[in-house]
């Protein structure tokens, strides 16, 4: 074996070893979804009611908002998609590559595997069954009247002057719609959470 051949084999071996080292480094230092979510913001395995609620949210979600694998899992199980199916998807997805906060899979994990605004608020909260004529809902709507733009999220500020007469309950209807949506948003400290806490509770604990 001549010197050139030996050198080529040695170079190839070095390149292979180097490549393997790079691969192992990338494997160990993968930037996964789990590394980009506060673990305290994830549901626990025994949060049965919350998992059931997430399954119901998922069943009414638009297909365009779901990652391909979650959509496939949902369609594959059809009406039998369960909390256990969602837990399995969450567990597997947390260890997949993080592609950015706008990535559908990341957003799905945050929404369906994590706590939401409502989970962090005590008392009886506005939900889809709340009557728009509910007295406490009406009181909460009235409180919006004197609030400034920097005290309310834009959607609440835009409805604060609606008529809430008994014939229409337009104000109560608008507040209810906002609350149902806000309470199901992923938990995050800020104005949305503060507003939901102030205006979306109809019976204190």
Image (cartoon, rainbow, N blue to C red):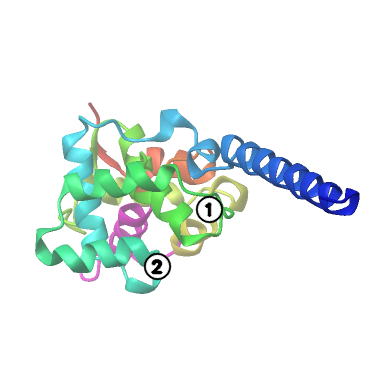
Residue at the outermost right position: 3
Query: Please, what secondary structure does the residue beneath circle 1 have?
Result: loop
* Residue placed under numbered mark 2 in the picture: 65
Residue at the outermost front position: 1
115 or 77: nearer the viewer = 77
- The residue at the point 32 percent across, 35 percent down is 43
> Residue 24 vs residue 44: left or right?
right
- The residue at the point 38 percent across, 41 percent down is 117
Residue 181 is one of the magenta-drawn residues: yes
Query: Please, what secondary structure does the residue beneath circle 2 have?
Result: helix
Please determine whether, in this image, residue 4 is positioned above or below residue 118.
Answer: below
- The residue at the point 33 percent across, 45 percent down is 90
Residue at the outermost left position: 80
Please determine whether, in this image, residue 205 is positioned above or below residue 200.
Answer: above
171 or 7: nearer the viewer = 7
Q: For the residue carrying disc 2, how many other residues have a C-alpha within 10 Å: few (<14), some (14-19), or many (20+)? A: few
**Residue 147: where, in percent of width, then height?**
53, 48
124 or 22: nearer the viewer = 22
Please determine whether, in this image, residue 108 is positioned above or below residue 17.
Answer: below
Where residue 56 sits, quadrant-wise, is: bottom left
> Residue 199 vs residue 104: left or right?
left
> Residue 154 vs residue 159: left or right?
right
Alpha-carbon distance for marks 1 and 2?
Answer: 23 Å
* Residue placed under numbered mark 1 in the picture: 153
What segment carries the magenta color? 161-182
């Amino acid at each position: 074996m001549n010197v050139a051949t030996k050198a080529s084999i040695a170079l190839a071996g070095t390149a292979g070893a180097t490549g393997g080292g790079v691969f192992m480094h990338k494997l160990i230092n993968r930037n996964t979804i789990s590394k980009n979510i506060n673990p305290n913001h994830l549901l626990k395995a025994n949060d049965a009611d919350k998992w059931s609620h997430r399954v119901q949210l998922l069943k009414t979600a638009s297909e365009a908002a779901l990652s391909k694998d979650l959509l496939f899992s949902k369609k594959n199980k059809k009406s039998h998609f369960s909390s256990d199916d969602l837990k399995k998807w969450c567990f597997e997805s947390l260890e997949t590559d993080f592609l950015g906060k706008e990535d559908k899979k990341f957003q799905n994990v945050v929404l369906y595997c994590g706590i939401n605004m409502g989970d962090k608020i005590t008392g009886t909260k506005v939900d889809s069954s709340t009557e728009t004529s509910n007295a406490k809902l009406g009181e909460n709507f009235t409180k919006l009247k004197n609030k400034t733009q920097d005290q309310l999220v834009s959607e609440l500020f835009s409805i604060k002057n609606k008529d809430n007469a008994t014939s229409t309950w337009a104000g109560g209807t608008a507040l209810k719609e906002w609350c149902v949506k806000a309470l199901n948003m992923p938990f995050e400290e800020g104005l949305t959470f503060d507003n939901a806490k102030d205006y979306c509770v109809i019976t204190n604990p």
